[in-house]
Amino acid sequence: MYNLQDYYNNFGKEHLDELWNGKMACAFFNDARTLTTNEMTESLNCYTFTLITKGELSLMNGNTILSFSKNDIYTYYPGSLLRIIDVSDDFEGICLFVDEQMAHSAQAFRNLLQASMIPLSKFGKSKLLLTSDDASRVQSVMMLISEYISQPLSLKNEILEMLYSVFIDDLISIQAFEKARFSISKQTEEIFISFYVLLQKNYIEQHHIGFYADALNITTTYLSRIVKSVSGRTVVGCINEMLAVEAVWMLKSTPLTVAQIADRLNFSTPAAFNKFFKRVRGCTPLSVRD
């Protein structure tokens, strides 16, 4: 997958400009700029939060079309199947990008998953509706982040990490009522988060549910039930989704042959990889490359 630095180098310079410090970026988007982000969808290894400040937007989340308007937030996490399909001419939004390495730092990662992955899967399929007051407060934090990114301060990184934590905590607080409504237990949430951390680190080498269940000291049946209850997907579906995203990125951005990609992704044979890819994506690897 592309990391945030790759995005900046290949696609983002005209969007991010000085609003980028190597770990975080905060960019302002109009209708034309927003559509260009489809170039990186499914292959960007970072987390993003986009607050719509004007106009309307619709996107495809898996097989579901979602509509967004002012004060809504849509979020992206590595491997999520989001694609923008329409944007109004008057669209404006502000987007916070967080590099995966920064996002995976200890408690920050756990907070991030609570603010993105769980709401994505359980509380609205990547859509978060804010009140006017909540949206105004969240936008203020995003604006502060954009201001500090461009300042030559000795403690800039520390300040940005603090503001990022405030941003995440605010989103978690906003969703507190929704979490109570759906009654996901703390244990269920902890197991799901632990599974997702393992998945991010091991999906290339480990394709089977048994590895993840053993690592968490639970049965495969229990892990399947937890993941299904929180995300609506199976464990195998989550693994396959990450593998397919990585495969698409390799096909589009590297000169590796299909056989080499199959080997890198730990498939037993190129034929097994081709069969997997056609089943998950509905087309052959070569058709994606072409």
Image: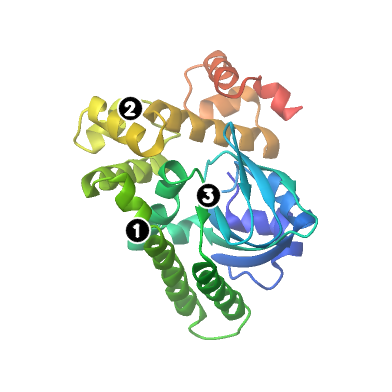
For marks 1 and 2, give the one nearer the viewer: 1
- Amino acid type for the residue under numbered disc 1: Ala
Furthest-bottom residue in view?
153
| SS at circle 3 | strand
Q: CA distance from mark 3 to mark 1?
A: 15 Å
- Crowd tier of the residue under label 3, counting other residues whose Cα lies within 10 Å: few below 14, some 14–19, many 20 or above: some
* Image side of residue 117 versus residue 258, left or right: left
Give the residue displayed 51% in from the left and 73% down from the top: 137
- The way the protein has been coloured in the rendering is rainbow
Q: Nearer the viewer, residue 236 or 120?
A: 120
Q: Distance from label 2 to label 3 (Cα)?
A: 29 Å
Residue at mark 2: 209
At label 2, counting other C-alpha atoms closer than 10 Å, the crowd grade (few under 14, some 14-19, many 20 or more) is some
Give yes or no for contact between labels 1 and 2 (Cβ–Cβ under 8 Å).
Answer: no
State the image coordinates of residue 259 (x, y, percent, origin top left). 60, 22
Task: Tell me residue 29's x, y (percent).
Answer: 71, 62
Q: Which residue is mark 3?
A: 127
The type of residue carrying mark 2 is Ile
Is 17 rendered above or below residue 192? below
Q: Is label 2 in a helix, a strand or a loop?
A: helix
Amino acid on which disc 3 is placed: Lys
Q: For the point 61% across and 58% down, which residue is it?
A: 5
